[in-house]
Image (tube, helix red, strand yellow):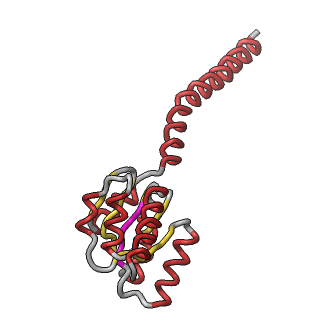
Amino acid sequence: MKSSEKQVIINNLQEQIDSYSHFYLTDISGLNAENTSDLRRQCFKQEVKLVVVKNTLLRKALESSAKNAEEIYDALKGNTTVMFSENANVPAKLIKDFSKKHKKPVLKAAYVEESIYVGADQLEALIAVKSKNELIADVVALLQSPMKTVLGQLQSGGTIIHGVLDTLKEKE
Protein backbone atom coordinates (compact mmCIF):
# COMPACT_ATOMS: atom_id res chain seq x y z
CA MET A 1 0.00 0.00 0.00
CA LYS A 2 1.36 3.41 -0.96
CA SER A 3 1.90 6.04 1.69
CA SER A 4 -0.64 8.33 -0.01
CA GLU A 5 -3.27 5.57 0.30
CA LYS A 6 -2.36 5.09 3.94
CA GLN A 7 -2.72 8.82 4.58
CA VAL A 8 -6.21 8.81 3.04
CA ILE A 9 -7.21 5.92 5.34
CA ILE A 10 -5.72 7.69 8.36
CA ASN A 11 -7.60 10.89 7.52
CA ASN A 12 -10.88 8.97 7.08
CA LEU A 13 -10.40 7.20 10.41
CA GLN A 14 -9.57 10.49 12.13
CA GLU A 15 -12.73 12.10 10.75
CA GLN A 16 -14.82 9.18 12.02
CA ILE A 17 -13.16 9.25 15.44
CA ASP A 18 -13.80 12.99 15.73
CA SER A 19 -17.36 12.84 14.39
CA TYR A 20 -18.65 9.96 16.53
CA SER A 21 -19.10 10.40 20.27
CA HIS A 22 -18.19 6.82 21.14
CA PHE A 23 -16.11 4.02 19.67
CA TYR A 24 -15.29 0.47 20.68
CA LEU A 25 -12.26 -1.61 19.69
CA THR A 26 -13.11 -5.27 19.29
CA ASP A 27 -11.63 -8.50 18.00
CA ILE A 28 -13.82 -10.42 15.54
CA SER A 29 -11.11 -12.78 14.28
CA GLY A 30 -12.33 -16.32 13.93
CA LEU A 31 -15.81 -15.40 12.68
CA ASN A 32 -16.64 -16.96 9.35
CA ALA A 33 -18.07 -14.91 6.47
CA GLU A 34 -21.68 -15.70 7.36
CA ASN A 35 -21.29 -14.67 11.00
CA THR A 36 -19.36 -11.54 10.05
CA SER A 37 -22.13 -10.55 7.64
CA ASP A 38 -24.71 -11.18 10.36
CA LEU A 39 -22.73 -8.96 12.76
CA ARG A 40 -22.52 -6.21 10.14
CA ARG A 41 -26.30 -6.43 9.56
CA GLN A 42 -27.01 -6.12 13.27
CA CYS A 43 -24.64 -3.17 13.52
CA PHE A 44 -26.35 -1.46 10.59
CA LYS A 45 -29.80 -1.97 12.15
CA GLN A 46 -28.64 -0.36 15.39
CA GLU A 47 -26.79 2.51 13.66
CA VAL A 48 -23.33 1.25 14.59
CA LYS A 49 -20.61 1.59 11.99
CA LEU A 50 -18.26 -1.41 11.88
CA VAL A 51 -14.80 -0.88 10.35
CA VAL A 52 -11.89 -3.35 10.17
CA VAL A 53 -8.62 -1.45 10.57
CA LYS A 54 -4.87 -1.91 10.71
CA ASN A 55 -3.54 -1.14 14.17
CA THR A 56 -0.75 1.17 12.98
CA LEU A 57 -3.13 3.25 10.88
CA LEU A 58 -5.67 3.47 13.72
CA ARG A 59 -2.95 4.55 16.13
CA LYS A 60 -1.85 7.35 13.80
CA ALA A 61 -5.48 8.43 13.39
CA LEU A 62 -5.93 8.46 17.18
CA GLU A 63 -2.73 10.47 17.62
CA SER A 64 -3.92 13.12 15.19
CA SER A 65 -7.45 13.11 16.60
CA ALA A 66 -8.80 15.74 18.98
CA LYS A 67 -9.73 13.01 21.49
CA ASN A 68 -7.28 11.99 24.19
CA ALA A 69 -7.15 8.22 23.85
CA GLU A 70 -3.55 7.31 24.70
CA GLU A 71 -4.63 4.56 27.11
CA ILE A 72 -6.14 2.65 24.17
CA TYR A 73 -2.79 2.24 22.40
CA ASP A 74 -1.93 -0.88 24.42
CA ALA A 75 -5.08 -2.59 23.08
CA LEU A 76 -3.93 -2.16 19.48
CA LYS A 77 -2.61 -5.69 19.06
CA GLY A 78 -3.88 -8.53 16.89
CA ASN A 79 -7.00 -8.09 14.80
CA THR A 80 -8.90 -4.89 15.49
CA THR A 81 -12.35 -3.82 14.43
CA VAL A 82 -13.79 -0.43 15.39
CA MET A 83 -17.46 0.10 16.19
CA PHE A 84 -18.51 3.75 15.92
CA SER A 85 -21.75 4.86 17.56
CA GLU A 86 -23.65 7.92 18.76
CA ASN A 87 -25.25 5.92 21.60
CA ALA A 88 -22.90 4.97 24.39
CA ASN A 89 -24.18 1.52 25.33
CA VAL A 90 -25.57 0.17 22.03
CA PRO A 91 -22.29 -1.43 20.87
CA ALA A 92 -21.77 -2.99 24.31
CA LYS A 93 -25.21 -4.59 24.22
CA LEU A 94 -24.60 -5.76 20.65
CA ILE A 95 -21.24 -7.30 21.62
CA LYS A 96 -22.80 -9.11 24.58
CA ASP A 97 -25.76 -10.47 22.60
CA PHE A 98 -23.70 -11.55 19.59
CA SER A 99 -20.92 -13.13 21.65
CA LYS A 100 -23.42 -15.40 23.46
CA LYS A 101 -23.71 -17.47 20.27
CA HIS A 102 -20.33 -16.96 18.61
CA LYS A 103 -17.82 -16.14 21.40
CA LYS A 104 -16.87 -13.07 19.35
CA PRO A 105 -16.58 -10.09 19.18
CA VAL A 106 -14.38 -9.58 22.19
CA LEU A 107 -14.09 -6.09 23.66
CA LYS A 108 -10.53 -4.79 23.65
CA ALA A 109 -11.14 -1.16 24.63
CA ALA A 110 -13.73 1.61 24.36
CA TYR A 111 -13.92 5.39 24.33
CA VAL A 112 -17.29 6.28 25.87
CA GLU A 113 -18.47 9.59 27.37
CA GLU A 114 -14.88 10.89 27.25
CA SER A 115 -13.73 7.95 29.41
CA ILE A 116 -11.62 4.99 28.41
CA TYR A 117 -12.45 1.40 29.25
CA VAL A 118 -9.85 -1.31 28.60
CA GLY A 119 -10.49 -5.05 28.64
CA ALA A 120 -13.36 -7.45 28.11
CA ASP A 121 -14.22 -7.29 31.82
CA GLN A 122 -15.49 -3.71 31.29
CA LEU A 123 -18.40 -4.86 29.10
CA GLU A 124 -21.00 -4.90 31.91
CA ALA A 125 -19.97 -1.40 33.02
CA LEU A 126 -20.37 -0.17 29.44
CA ILE A 127 -23.84 -1.71 29.17
CA ALA A 128 -24.86 0.24 32.27
CA VAL A 129 -23.68 3.58 30.84
CA LYS A 130 -26.69 5.72 30.04
CA SER A 131 -26.94 7.88 26.97
CA LYS A 132 -27.46 11.63 27.18
CA ASN A 133 -31.15 11.29 26.28
CA GLU A 134 -31.68 8.61 28.95
CA LEU A 135 -30.08 10.86 31.58
CA ILE A 136 -32.25 13.81 30.53
CA ALA A 137 -35.35 11.60 30.78
CA ASP A 138 -34.29 10.51 34.29
CA VAL A 139 -33.84 14.14 35.40
CA VAL A 140 -37.22 15.14 33.96
CA ALA A 141 -38.88 12.21 35.74
CA LEU A 142 -37.23 13.22 39.02
CA LEU A 143 -38.41 16.81 38.59
CA GLN A 144 -41.97 15.71 37.79
CA SER A 145 -42.27 13.34 40.74
CA PRO A 146 -42.79 15.96 43.51
CA MET A 147 -45.29 17.86 41.37
CA LYS A 148 -47.29 14.71 40.72
CA THR A 149 -47.30 13.91 44.43
CA VAL A 150 -48.57 17.38 45.38
CA LEU A 151 -51.27 17.31 42.69
CA GLY A 152 -52.37 13.85 43.79
CA GLN A 153 -52.61 14.95 47.41
CA LEU A 154 -54.56 18.08 46.47
CA GLN A 155 -56.99 16.02 44.43
CA SER A 156 -57.45 13.44 47.17
CA GLY A 157 -57.90 16.24 49.74
CA GLY A 158 -60.74 17.66 47.65
CA THR A 159 -62.41 14.25 47.58
CA ILE A 160 -62.12 13.92 51.37
CA ILE A 161 -63.60 17.40 51.96
CA HIS A 162 -66.45 16.61 49.57
CA GLY A 163 -67.13 13.37 51.47
CA VAL A 164 -67.15 15.18 54.83
CA LEU A 165 -69.58 17.81 53.49
CA ASP A 166 -71.89 15.10 52.12
CA THR A 167 -71.87 13.35 55.52
CA LEU A 168 -72.70 16.59 57.37
CA LYS A 169 -75.48 17.33 54.88
CA GLU A 170 -77.04 13.89 55.47
CA LYS A 171 -76.98 14.40 59.28
CA GLU A 172 -79.04 17.57 58.99
Whether residue 89 is in magenta: the answer is: no
Q: Is residue 13 above or below residue 104?
A: above
Which image quarter holds the N terminus?
Answer: bottom left
Depth check, front residue: 103 or 63: 63
Can the viewer see residue 50?
yes
Depth check, front residue: 55 or 159: 55
The span shown in magenta is 23-27
Can the viewer see residue 93?
no
> Horizontal placement of 131 versus 111: left or right?
right
Q: Quadrant of residue 32?
A: bottom left
Whether residue 25 is in magenta: the answer is: yes
> Horizontal placement of 64 versus 165: left or right?
left
Q: Is residue 25 above or below residue 71?
A: below
Which image quarter holds the C terminus?
Answer: top right
Number of numbered discs present?
0
Residue 127: give x, y in percent of width and height: 40, 60
> Horizontal placement of 103 versus 87: left or right?
left
Residue 161: give x, y in percent of width and height: 67, 17
The residue that appears at 50% across and 69% down in the rendered structure is 49
The residue that appears at 30% across and 69% down in the rendered structure is 108
Depth check, front residue: 64 or 110: 64
Residue 39: give x, y in percent of width and height: 49, 79
Magenta span: helix, strand or loop, mainly?
Answer: strand
